[in-house]
Image (cartoon, rainbow, N blue to C red):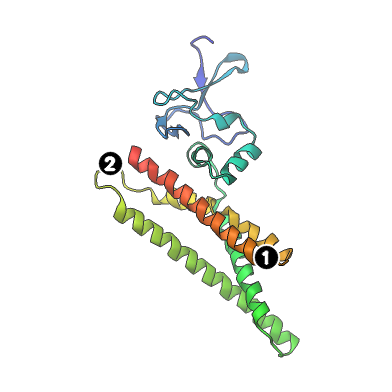
Amino acid sequence: MGTGGRSGPRPGKGVAGAASAPCQYRCIECNREARELYRDYSHGVLKITICKSCQKPVDKYIECDPVIILINAILCKAQAYRHILFNTKINIHGKLCMFCLLCEAYLRWWQLQDSNQNTAPDDLIRYAKEWDFYRMFAIASLEQTAFFIGIFTFLWVERPMTAKKKPNFFLLLKALLLSSYGKLLLIPAVIWEHDYTPLCLKLIKVFVLTSNFQAIRVDSFVLSVA
């Protein structure tokens, strides 16, 4: 291979910038810090960096198709979560949060309409239904905010006294927002309504909570090895 190799991001894979800053990546296997993900030699020859701690590739997912990464994330694999959180630049968590809140608000609004029997004129009904949706969106936003604050408070109180670093709440928030993508399934479950819709809604909630737990576990483990 020679000795003239250089490190840097592989085009089109969403990896963070060149490895000029020390230890800006993490091994997806043992979660130890790494200076680079791979080396780019002359003539387009790439070699994945081997972790000095576990002797495994730092990030095998840089060679994988995004669909493979998504499937592994759906399966709640810790390696996929570490790849997405630490070794890529994904800035869709804000938009994803808004979409998830809209899905949650629509579900609540749909359940509210099923339980209400209104005999008012059509114009009043449409006006009331519109404000009902805004109200459900506000309630969903407040509940999610309270849920995140509860998690932050618990992790702050329960963090080890010997921890060298304080919890990175921004990274944890990003992990929680990205791991809530399962809420997008609420819309198809409501649109294609059938006898098993209540069961599907419960399974979606369980999946979202499982994804959130895995994201918290991955992010909290960083503190224990820092």
Q: Quadrant of the C terminus?
A: top left
Q: Which secondary structure, mark 2?
A: loop
Residue at left 58%, top 14%?
42
Residue 64 on image: x %, y %: 62, 32
Residue at left 48%, top 28%?
58
* Residue that mark 2 sits on: 164
Q: Nearer the viewer, mark 2 or mark 1?
A: 1
Q: CA distance from mark 2 to mark 1?
A: 47 Å
Whether 122 is drawn above or below 162: the answer is: below
Q: Which secondary structure, mark 1?
A: helix
Residue 44 falls left or right of residue 5 = right
Residue 145 falls left or right of residue 164 = right
Residue 51 on image: x %, y %: 44, 25
State whether residue 203 appears in this view. yes
Query: Could you tell me the amino acid type at mark 1?
Result: Thr
Q: Residues within 10 Å of mark 1 (few under 14, many from 20)?
A: some
Q: Residues within 10 Å of mark 2 (few under 14, many from 20)?
A: few
Query: Could you tell me the amino acid type at mark 2?
Result: Lys
Residue 188 on image: x %, y %: 70, 60
Whether 61 is drawn above or below 42: the answer is: below
Indicate the quadrant where residue 31 lies: top left
Residue 37 falls left or right of residue 195 = left
Furthest residue toward top: 2
Indicate the quadrant where residue 75 lies: top right
Q: Which mark is residue 197?
A: 1
> 199 or 149: which is nearer to us?
199
Residue at left 59%, top 55%?
182
> 144 or 79: which is nearer to us?
79
Q: Earlier in the sequence, mark 2 or mark 1?
A: 2
Residue 193 on image: x %, y %: 72, 66
> 122 or 225: which is nearer to us?
225
Residue at left 46%, top 32%?
29
